[in-house]
């Protein structure tokens, strides 16, 4: 039997080559997008973005997660995460699209296999599902009073929590976790370069700080930079230290300093200390961690002084020195004041909160007017203000369970590259939780999505690491091959 060469027509009228069969629908789609662009450019942009995400999903769902994370973090200065596509009066954000695509893909995958995905039974996931269910109750109680504002608040505080459950099956493949890790490092690199560009051009972000200095990146951008630094330390520096990794680390550290975000500096300190003292050989790791960071700091200060940016170096030193004056610091005084006002209002309904979408309104004693556009700069208090201390208790319990699971897995993999990867993830969790006490992470679509995605990555890494240890122990108990030291699997870049 003769075969028809690919890309040719058969003499008897057989089907054309695959690329020719695809040509009509591609041209039709392009024509439709062009027509929609002339009618409504925003909808056209949304359609194109959706097609890109669907194509990525067909190849690897982790690429969709990475694409949305990059979109959110790199677009944070321009509020791209808050740009929406209105469908029937309902605004669809990039994070909503991520939830929809992951849920739809996992559902279709289950139907293809002949069984719907099963609900997880581990304690962490159960607490998360209770937290989400309570969020639905809070939405039901709040919607009659606050309408669409309640829906938006529900998304940020509760709905995106589903990403934890949706990301876990997607990230079981080590290659998928590696691709997501690379996306995080690349995104942090972009933010670091943006901060350096802002410093060189004098393009500061926001107004002056309470130390009368200027910041060149936002605190949320600095948070992402610390994630990049921590993961770089845990997945690259723990194995080998190529030259490019020091350059990358220098850019991350420079961006964190240029942000002059004290809440992130504090969170980074607690995160790194968690990683150091959680390791099996913390004395040696203090030196291994401190030497490159101190060397990079000294190099950055020297370069800043030589290049004529001595004033910027002085600003950063002045901002760091302001920790000693925290009780009298204007920012500290203001935050303590609004926290007291919020607690006073919360006494009316401490268990269920004042409602999703309820604006925090207080009398601004400095301007002698009512103020309703300020945030509380405390993610936990903001959650309590909207949905009560039940929501806060469930959220904190979720965070603690994830952290405990990761630290336990790290201890069981002591002395291996896997331990470093797990401790890096634990460091990210602690930094995020600590920074949330003095920042607006709970009200940001950018930082909120990181809570759930990083928690999912942490849980998958911990499960896989413990599974390898258990399999090695079982193999040794049955007289099989000896237990080899666990490897990083997905952690190595």
Image (tube, helix red, strand yellow):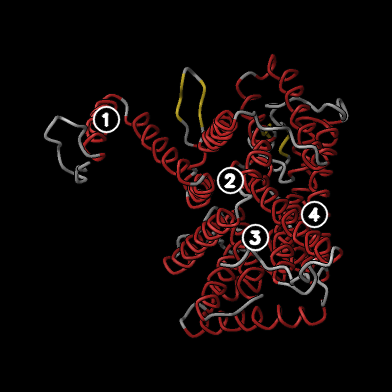
Closer to viewer: mark 3 or mark 1: 1
Q: Tell me which label, 3 or 2, sits earlier in the chain.
A: 3
Callout 3 secondary element: loop
Give the Cα separation between the discs numbered 4 and 3.
Answer: 24 Å
| Crowding at mark 2 (Cα within 10 Å: few <14, some 14-19, many 20+) | many
Give the Cα separation between the discs numbered 4 and 2.
Answer: 21 Å
Tag shown at residue 397: none
Whether residue 341 is visible, yes or no, is: no
Callout 1 secondary element: helix
Q: Tell me which label, 4 or 3, sits earlier in the chain.
A: 3
Q: Nearer the viewer, residue 310 or 178?
A: 178
CB of mark 3 within 8 Å of CB of mark 2?
no
Closer to viewer: mark 4 or mark 3: 4
Whether residue 261 is visible, yes or no, is: yes
| Crowding at mark 3 (Cα within 10 Å: few <14, some 14-19, many 20+) | many
Tag shown at residue 25: 1
Callout 2 secondary element: helix
């Amino acid at each position: 039997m003769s075969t028809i060469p690919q890309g040719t027509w058969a003499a008897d009228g057989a089907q054309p080559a695959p690329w020719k069969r695809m040509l009509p629908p591609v041209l039709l789609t392009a024509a439709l997008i062009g027509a929609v662009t002339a009618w409504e450019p925003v909808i056209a942009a949304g359609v194109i973005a959706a097609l890109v995400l669907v194509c990525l999903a067909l190849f690897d769902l982790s690429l969709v997660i990475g694409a949305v994370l990059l979109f959110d973090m790199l677009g944070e200065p321009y509020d791209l995460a808050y740009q929406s596509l209105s469908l029937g009066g309902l605004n669809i954000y990039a994070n909503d699209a991520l939830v929809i695509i992951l849920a739809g893909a996992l559902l279709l995958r289950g139907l293809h296999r002949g069984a719907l995905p099963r609900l997880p039974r581990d304690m962490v996931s159960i607490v998360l599902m209770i937290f989400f269910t309570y969020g639905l109750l809070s939405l039901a109680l709040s919607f009659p009073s606050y309408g669409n504002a309640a829906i938006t608040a529900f998304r940020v505080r509760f709905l995106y929590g589903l990403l934890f459950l949706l990301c876990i099956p997607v990230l079981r493949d080590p290659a998928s976790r590696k691709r997501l890790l690379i996306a995080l490092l690349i995104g942090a690199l972009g933010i670091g370069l943006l901060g350096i560009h802002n410093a060189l051009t004098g393009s500061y972000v926001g107004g002056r700080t309470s130390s009368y200095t200027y910041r060149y990146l936002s605190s949320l951008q600095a948070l992402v930079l610390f994630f990049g630094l921590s993961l770089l330390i845990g997945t690259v520096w723990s194995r080998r230290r190529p030259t490019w990794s020091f350059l990358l680390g220098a850019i991350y550290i420079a961006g964190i300093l240029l942000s002059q975000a004290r809440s992130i500096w504090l969170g980074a300190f607690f995160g790194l200390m968690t990683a150091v003292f959680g390791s099996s050989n913390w004395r040696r790791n203090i030196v291994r961690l401190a030497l490159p960071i101190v060397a990079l700091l000294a190099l950055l200060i020297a370069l800043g002084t030589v290049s004529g940016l001595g004033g910027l170096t002085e600003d950063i030193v002045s901002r760091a020195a302001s920790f000693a004056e925290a009780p009298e610091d204007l920012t500290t005084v203001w935050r303590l004041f609004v926290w007291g006002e919020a607690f006073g209002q919360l006494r009316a309904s401490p268990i269920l909160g004042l409602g999703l979408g309820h604006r925090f309104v207080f009398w601004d004693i400095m301007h002698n007017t009512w103020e309703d556009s300020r945030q509380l700069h405390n993610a936990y208090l903001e959650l309590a203000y909207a949905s009560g201390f039940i929501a806060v208790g469930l959220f904190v319990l979720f965070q603690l369970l994830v952290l405990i699971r990761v630290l336990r897995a790290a201890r069981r993999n002591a002395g291996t590259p896997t331990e470093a990867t797990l401790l890096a993830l634990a460091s990210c969790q602690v930094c995020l939780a600590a920074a949330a006490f003095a920042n607006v992470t709970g009200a940001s679509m950018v930082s909120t999505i990181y809570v759930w995605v990083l928690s999912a990555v942490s849980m998958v890494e911990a499960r896989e690491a413990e599974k390898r240890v258990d399999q090695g122990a079982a193999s040794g108990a049955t007289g099989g091959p000896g237990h080899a030291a666990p490897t990083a699997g997905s952690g190595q870049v």
